């Protein structure tokens, strides 16, 4: 669509109003006017310069307790794509921000419709900075800034979708352990001492991994602590 409030909101509405909308439907816009990010944030990008789209999936094979693997397979597919493009030092900032070096190049917002203990619909929203070369914050980057060239959005979309599909097929084959292993090996700040913050506290700690529900494990002077997404921020 030339313009859309949020491709995630549109896709969620689509799968509720049209239950026959096929798995693999992609909703994409040149100008997203009310993009949504994680933790209730907004996602703002310059019109016509970046990829802002959502993929509708129906992973009825996945049990709700394995929800974190939606994050894992999506993050890995973005990493595969960026690696293929020649970006170096691609890392996954838990749970699903994609970084090149110390800058964010891509955000992912996954929203689910659950029925019983299975997923009926999953919307994978992806915002990938492609040709934008100026950002309000100095913690953002794009393909253009990383690789010093411009890209055709349609052809990048097609390449990226092929990587998403390949990883989705692995998820469908239940290749969970090896994907988790790869995810862990690509985690931003893993094994390094850094500052983090919670609502009431700043502290130093080292990311050691994840528990079986995808919660972040951080080792501090008082021992190992587990955090949900909304409970913790990375500081420096
Ligand atoms: C984040 O990093 O906070 C996640 C950002 C996700 C942005 C994408 S852009 C396409 C899709 N539609 C939305 O409204 N959000 C996601």
Image (tube, rainbow, N blue to C red):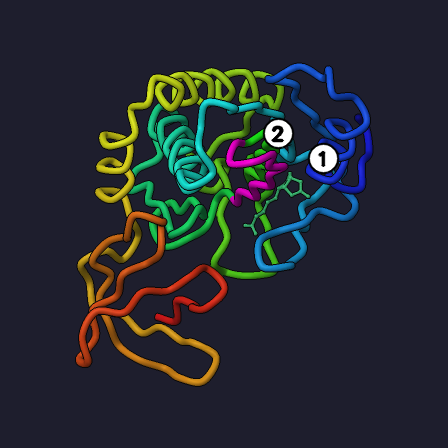
Quadrant position of residue 66: top left
Nearest the viewer among 94 and 235 is 94
Residue indicated by mark 1: 12
CB under 8 Å between discs 2 and 1: yes
Residue in the image at 55% along x and 35% along y: 130
Mark whose residue sits in front, 2 or 1: 2
Instruction: Please tell me which residue lies in front, 106 or 26.
Output: 26
Furthest toward the bottom, the residue is: 200
Secondary structure of the residue carrying tag 1 is: helix
The residue nearer to you, when weighing 144 against 235, is 235
Task: Identify residue for label 2.
Answer: 121
Q: Is residue 116 within the magenta segment?
A: yes
User: Dot 2: within a 10 Å radius of its alpha carbon, few (fewer than 14), some, or many (20 or more) residues?
Assistant: many
Q: Is residue 72 left or right of residue 157?
A: left
Image position of 227 with respect to 209: above or below:
below
Q: Is residue 217 left or right of residue 235?
A: left
Which residue is rendered at x = 47% and y = 15% of the image? 162
Residues shaded magenta: 107-118
Q: Quadrant of the C terminus?
A: bottom left
Q: Position of residue 149 (x, y in %)?
A: 49, 31
Vertical placement of residue 222 versus 194, above or below: below
SS at badge 2: strand
Viewer-proximal residue among 208 and 132: 208
Q: Indicate yes or no: mark 1 CB to ligand 1 under 8 Å.
A: no
Q: Considering the image in quadrants, where does the N terminus appear?
A: top right
């Amino acid at each position: 669509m030339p313009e859309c409030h949020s491709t995630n909101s549109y896709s969620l509405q689509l799968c509720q109003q049209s239950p026959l909308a096929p798995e693999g439907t992609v909703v994409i816009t040149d100008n997203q006017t009310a993009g949504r990010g994680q933790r209730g944030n907004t996602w703002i990008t310059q019109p016509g310069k970046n990829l802002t789209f959502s993929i509708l999936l129906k992973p009825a094979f996945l049990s709700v307790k394995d929800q974190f693997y939606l994050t894992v397979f999506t993050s890995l597919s973005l990493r595969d794509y960026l690696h293929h493009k020649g970006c170096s030092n691609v890392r996954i900032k838990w749970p699903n921000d994609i970084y090149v070096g110390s800058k964010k190049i891509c955000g992912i917002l996954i929203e689910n419709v659950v029925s019983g203990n299975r997923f009926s619909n999953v919307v994978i929203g992806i915002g990938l900075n492609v040709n934008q070369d100026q950002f309000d914050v100095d913690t953002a980057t794009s393909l253009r800034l990383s690789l010093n060239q411009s890209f055709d959005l349609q052809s990048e979309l097609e390449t990226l979708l092929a990587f998403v599909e390949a990883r989705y097929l692995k998820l469908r084959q239940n290749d969970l352990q090896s994907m988790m292993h790869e995810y862990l090996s690509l985690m931003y700040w893993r094994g390094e001492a850094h500052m983090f913050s919670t609502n009431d506290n700043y502290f130093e700690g080292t990311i050691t991994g994840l528990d079986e529900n995808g919660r972040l494990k951080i080792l501090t002077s008082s021992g190992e602590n587990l955090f949900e997404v909304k409970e913790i921020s990375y500081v420096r």
